[in-house]
Image (cartoon, grey):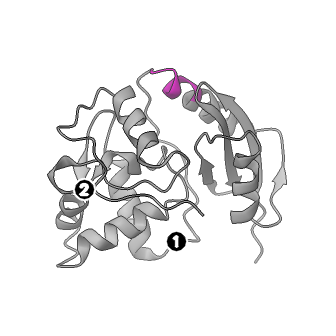
Amino acid sequence: MTTNYAFAVFEAKSGTCAIAWSHDGICGFHLPGDEPNQAEHAIRRRFTGAERASPIAEIAVVIERVRAYFEGERSDFSDLRLDLSAQTDLYRQIYLATRRLGWGSTTTYGGLAAELELGPAGAWTIGQAMAKNPIPLIIPCHRVLAAGRKIGGFSAPGGSNSKLRMLELEGVELPDTTPAQQSFAF
């Protein structure tokens, strides 16, 4: 069975975003980047054959929530329908646990791994899932920190600086904002 994907590109205070959806829910999101066309290219790369479309009513509401978030308004995305069908069972479990982190709340890779009883390599597994998060912000991977509440990596546009700005929007103060690891740009 072929899944049909649609996407929309929109402006927020921090730049151009893109959101992709299927009939089952939101399946992709691209955080604001440096170039206006970067968001569309990222979505098209991830969802081959996706068609640009006007947002359906459900997605239009999400877009307004995203805009409010980047304006600094307390925003909650935990009630949104997501399409995580392309993810493994383990990653779906990790993403669902991450969605429970509300505005201004954080945990660590190790803390989330312990909660999910993932064993000795659990923190690494959490880090891998966060790096591959198809729906950042809505699945709030920016709220998952490295040991010692260090900022950790962030594979979205802007790297760890974007993660730090998002946490600051939510009023999160960190003792050390030096990244625990560097992000890679491809």
Label 2 sits on residue:
146
Residue placed at 18% from the left, 57% from the top? 147
Q: Position of residue 116 (x, y in %)?
A: 23, 67
Of badges 2 and 1, the one in the foreground is 2
Q: Secondary structure at mark 1?
A: loop
Ranked by sequence position, the earlier of labels 2 and 1 is 1
Which of the two residues, 179 or 154, is positioned nearer the viewer here? 179
Disc 2 crowd rating (10 Å Cα; few below 14, some 14-19, many 20+) is some
Image: 74 above or below 147: above
The three-letter amino acid code for the residue at tag 2 is: Ala
Residue placed at 24% from the left, 73% from the top? 122
In the image: residue 46, left or right of residue 167: right
Q: Position of residue 34 (x, y in %)?
A: 64, 40
Q: Position of residue 163 (x, y in %)?
A: 41, 43
In the image: residue 144, left or right of residue 22: left
Residue 177 lies in what quarter of the image? top left
Q: CA distance from mark 2 to mark 1?
A: 23 Å
Residue placed at 33% from the left, 45% from the top? 143
Q: Secondary structure at mark 2?
A: loop
Which of the two residues, 30 or 3, is positioned nearer the viewer here? 30
Residue placed at 43% from the left, 41% from the top? 161
Quadrant placement of the N terminus: bottom right
Looking at the rendered structure, which numbered label has been put on residue 87?
1
Image: 118 above or below 18: below
Q: Magenta stretch: dominant SS?
A: helix
In the image, residue 73 lies in the stretch drawn in magenta:
no
Quadrant placement of the C terminus: bottom right
In the image: residue 6, left or right of residue 132: right
Query: Which residues are the magenta region?
Result: 67-72
Looking at the rendered structure, which numbered label has been put on residue 37?
none
